[in-house]
Amino acid sequence: MSIRQNIIDIAMAERELPKPRVADYWQDVLTPQDFEGPHPPAWCGCFCLYCYHRAGLLLDAHWRVGHGFAERFLRHELVTNVQVGDLAYLQVTNTMLWFVTLWGATSSLSMAMA
């Protein structure tokens, strides 16, 4: 199984649950000292990082409350070759939507996990 497919399988398995396990996602991605505080209400980026962690990727990346996790990974140019399993974000007005792309560039937006 490819790494990308593993990420997708993890995301889809979580999506099949009757209720998202948001507290578990936050516990996985926050440092122990940050987990004690209030969790941000939006958890789409947290979910993406959780899926990557479960796949054994970005294990040294943790969510920084108020900053996220991806400063060192972000590329600021338009990417047209989005592939299944990629981590992506969109700036929509003042909100960032994070998602793991499930079917590549053409239909990934419908699967935003926000």
Image (tube, grey):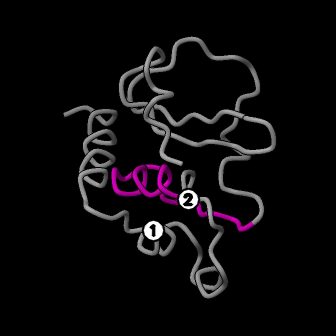
Depth order, front residue of 49/94: 94
In this image, 48 relative to 90: left or right?
left
Residue that sits furthest to the left in the current view: 1
Distance in Å between CA atoms under marks 1 and 2: 7 Å
**SS for callout 1:** helix
In this image, 57 relative to 37: left or right?
left
Tell me the amino acid under the disc marked 1.
Answer: Val
In this image, 88 relative to 53: left or right?
right
Residue 20 sits in which quadrant?
Answer: bottom left
Q: Which one is earlier in the sequence, the residue at label 1 or at label 2?
A: 1
Q: Which mark is residue 108?
A: none
Q: Where residue 23 appears, x then y in whole percent? A: 46, 75
102 up-or-down from 97: above or below: above
Q: Where residue 94 appears, x then y in whole percent? A: 81, 43
Query: Residue 48: within the magenta?
Result: yes
Q: Which mark is residue 43?
A: 2
- Report if the CB atoms under discs 1 and 2 are less than 8 Å apart: yes
The residue under the point 61% across, 88% down is: 36
109 up-or-down from 34: above or below: above
Q: Which residues, given as a range, are shown in magenta?
A: 46-65
**SS for callout 2:** loop
Residue wearing tag 1: 22
Tell me the amino acid under the disc marked 2.
Answer: Trp
